Image (cartoon, rainbow, N blue to C red):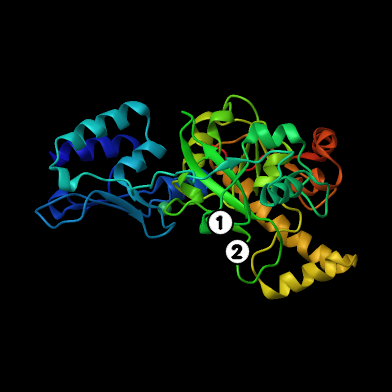
Amino acid sequence: MSAVAAGILTAFLGRPKEGSYLSGGQLSYNCPRCREQNHGEWDNKYNLDITFPGARGRPPLVASCWKCSLSVPTNQLLRLYAPANLLQAWRSYEQTLPPGTRSVPRAVRAAQLPEDFERVREHSQDPYMQAAWFYLTAPGPEGRGLPPFLVQELGFGISREPRWLNRVLLPSYDAEGELNYVIGRLLWDNDPQQPPYATTAGVKRTDIIFNEHRLDWNQPVMLVEGIFDYAAYPYNTVPLLGKSLVPGMPLEARLRRYRPPVILGIDMDAVGPDPLALALREVARGGQERPRDVLRSRAAGDREALLQRLAELGIEQRYWLDLPRNDMGKLLQHDGYRAVPALVAHAMRPDPPRLATW
Ligand SMILES: [Zn+2]
């Protein structure tokens, strides 16, 4: 039985390490993610351990690499790195296993809209609705500058449930049109009591692709950070809801499969929650040039990491945006929706070829 599994794995990972035996319940292979990071060359370190189910109480089939920290159920490893016929063969193999030993993907909880969810609309007598409308449509700095049609098209809403109170909610739907995530932005900034964003409990940003039903993977795809960057140009755009790609996230799998041209529109001065950097950012807002340069070089680091990862995923046409403002959302706020496409077109810079493409 395990010889079947070993045959499938060897067909796309190459031979396992000599001396690692089926009978021992574990085989060590070269890691395909490390290969991506190593310019497409196998490193021959055999860091990827695949544990086979044995007697009762043994761990289920899991692939983990101690070097790059890839850690996924083995069927997901095949989904990410193996051709379709091998994935099919693997699924058939798993069907022959006792249920307790199959690789079960981490259960992702189903997203739900709050029961009292209401679409944001104009001309309401309800002060709460009025506040949400103002927040979304007023030009910056008070509001986000969305045109009214886009408030409707993207389906922004409100709820009075505690988790979502005083927020504008943006639901996300998967490729089949099923709700997969909700993100809620607080109507004001800098509240020590409440985080700026609330999201669906039990679902991580890396579990989902935001509004995949609006995407055509055969066309160029733009990657941005947040939902208001997204709202600035929500056409074939994916908000990362962060500033990194994470191994195993479905977005990486889609990019690897379709390899569309990618335009990276992340913040120009984006930094992590580093107090010094945040202080510098405040100074930068005062208009001084030098701290902003520091921030820009850090932002370039984030951008560089993402472009490098895109190259590893096999994306050959990569562009990044040298935006005239900090981010896409700021263009929307201060320049207006109509100005965004031309500003983006002028900001596009090609990323030169990198060794890692394979
Ligand atoms: Zn690895």
Q: Position of residue 177 (x, y in %)?
A: 49, 30
Q: In this view, does 271 lie above or below 42?
A: below
Q: Which of 33 and 333 is in front in this view?
A: 333
Q: Is residue 94 left or right of residue 112?
A: left
Q: Is residue 184 above or below residue 178?
A: below
Q: Name the residue under label 2.
A: 195
- Tell me if label 1 and label 2 are in contact, CB under 8 Å: yes
Determine whether the residue tagged by mark 1 lies in a helix, strand or loop: strand
Q: Which residue is drawn at 88% across and 67% down?
A: 286
Residue 243 visible to the viewer:
no
Q: Is residue 68 left or right of residue 240?
A: left
Q: Residue at x 66, y 71 (%)?
A: 274
Q: Which residue is drawn at 52% across and 40% down?
A: 209
Q: Nearer the viewer, residue 199 or 63?
A: 199
Q: Residues within 10 Å of mark 1 (few under 14, many from 20)?
A: some
Q: What residue type is labelled 1?
A: Ala
Q: Which amino acid does label 2 sit on?
A: Pro
Q: Nearer the viewer, residue 23 or 235?
A: 235
Q: Residue at x 71, y 41 (%)?
A: 124
Q: For the residue with label 2, is its CB less than 8 Å from the closest atom of ligand 1? A: no
Kindly give the residue lying farthest to the left in the view shown. Answer: 55
Marks 1 and 2, how far apart at CA: 7 Å
Q: In which quarter of the image is the N terminus?
A: top left
Q: In this view, does 307 lie above or below 275?
A: above
Q: Name the residue under label 1.
A: 198
Q: Where is residue 191 in the image (x, y as percent from the top left)?
A: 67, 68
Kindly give the residue lying farthest to the front in the view shown. Answer: 125
Q: Residues within 10 Å of mark 2 (few under 14, many from 20)?
A: few
Q: Where is residue 197 in the image (x, y as percent from the top left)?
A: 60, 57
Determine whether the residue tagged by mark 2 lies in a helix, strand or loop: loop
Q: Where is residue 271 in the image (x, y as percent from the top left)?
A: 69, 62
Q: Which of 42 and 89 is in front in this view?
A: 89
